[in-house]
Image (cartoon, helix red, strand yellow):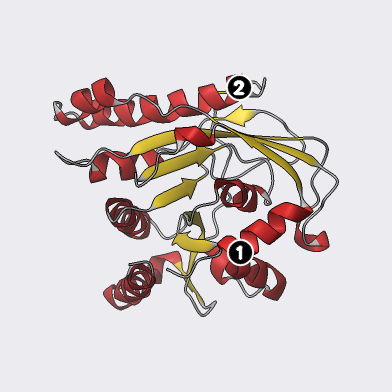
Amino acid sequence: MISKLDELRELREKLNISVNGLENIKENKSAILVSNHSCLMDIFYVPCVIDKDIISLISSRLMYKNDTLRKNVVNKYLNGFPIEAHGGIVYSQMCLEYSAKLLKDGHILSIFPEGAYIEDDGNIYKGRTGAARILFSSIGDEFKPSIIPVAIKIDGKIEELDNYFPTDNEVKINILEPVNYEEIYYNYINTDSRKEKNLCLHQVTETAMRRIANSIGKNYIDEYIELFPKNNVIYQDGETIKTEPAQNVEHVYRYKRELDSIIKNYS
């Protein structure tokens, strides 16, 4: 994996950003960092303060969209892994399975369970269960990664990438203690009920998101932020294919080959 630490350290020097709780990320231990999402810049703030090479699970549109500025900024500072949320269950499941492989390979992953943000809202919303699914699918007898809530509090309104990186907003990152999921995982593996398994996944996710909300004095809203359907799958070269024809085996395997290539680069 190509280290982005030098670029991130240089970026941190430009920002008014502070961090507490770094001791909660243990040396040589795989982990999933789950954070609240209040603006696009969040995806840079988390790796900026960790001072470790991490992999950011982000929208495939942010990684592949034909938007030169955004692509250049993302590629400069992040080791990204695409999450395709608009291609149906085949694509989303494939992304989660590959993410679990990265976790089992010893990486630290960063993810935003809310999946989107509402500008100037300030609330913490119900998280989707992707992080919990990655976690539970990777656990083994000798492998028990951490899932760590990371709270981001921003003073003032953050402008998007139009100004590259703003420097006048105060950003506080609070890395909380890992979620204790052992009992929830025990219940998860000891039920055949899909409904009960989903409840376990939601319990892990909600625990993390409520702790984030409490740590920065925000309201927790037990509702999802609506994801506006894009009705297409986007590939590495920026090409988009409508969701329905993208279910064709040829297109699915094209996406799989692209994920295989990314995984190989992170080995």
How many other residues sit within 10 Å of disc 2, few (<14), some (14-19) or many (≥20)? some
Number of numbered discs on residues: 2
Q: Nearer the viewer, residue 14 or 222?
A: 14
- The answer to which image quadrant residue 144 occupies is top left
- The answer to which image quadrant residue 170 occupies is top right
Q: Could you say which disc has been placed on residue 50 in the image? A: none
In the shown orientation, is residue 37 left or right of residue 187? right
On screen, residue 108 above or below 139: below
Which residue does the numbered mark 2 point to in the structure image?
A: 215
Quadrant of image for the N terminus: bottom left
Q: Which residue is located at x 49 percent, y 46 percent?
A: 111
Q: Which residue is located at x 50 percent, y 55 percent?
A: 56
On screen, residue 52 above or below 124: below
In the rendered image, residue 233, in percent from the top left (x then y), is placed at 47, 67
In the shown orientation, is residue 140 left or right of residue 199? left
Q: Which amino acid does label 2 sit on?
A: Ser
Q: Which residue is located at x 41 percent, y 29 percent?
A: 178
On screen, residue 81 above or below 110: below
Residue 105 in view: yes
Which residue does the numbered mark 1 point to in the structure image?
A: 6
Quadrant of image for the C terminus: bottom left
Q: Which of 252 and 43 is in front in this view?
A: 43
On screen, residue 239 above or below 47: below
Q: Do the residues labelled 2 and 1 touch (CB within 8 Å)?
A: no
Residue 222 in view: no
In the rendered image, residue 179, in percent from the top left (x then y), is placed at 39, 27
Marks 2 and 1 sit apart, C-alpha to C-alpha, by: 30 Å
How many other residues sit within 10 Å of disc 1, few (<14), some (14-19) or many (≥20)? few
As helix, strand or loop, the secondary structure at mark 1 comes to helix
Dot 2 or dot 1, earlier in sequence: 1
Q: What residue type is labelled 1?
A: Asp
As helix, strand or loop, the secondary structure at mark 2 comes to helix
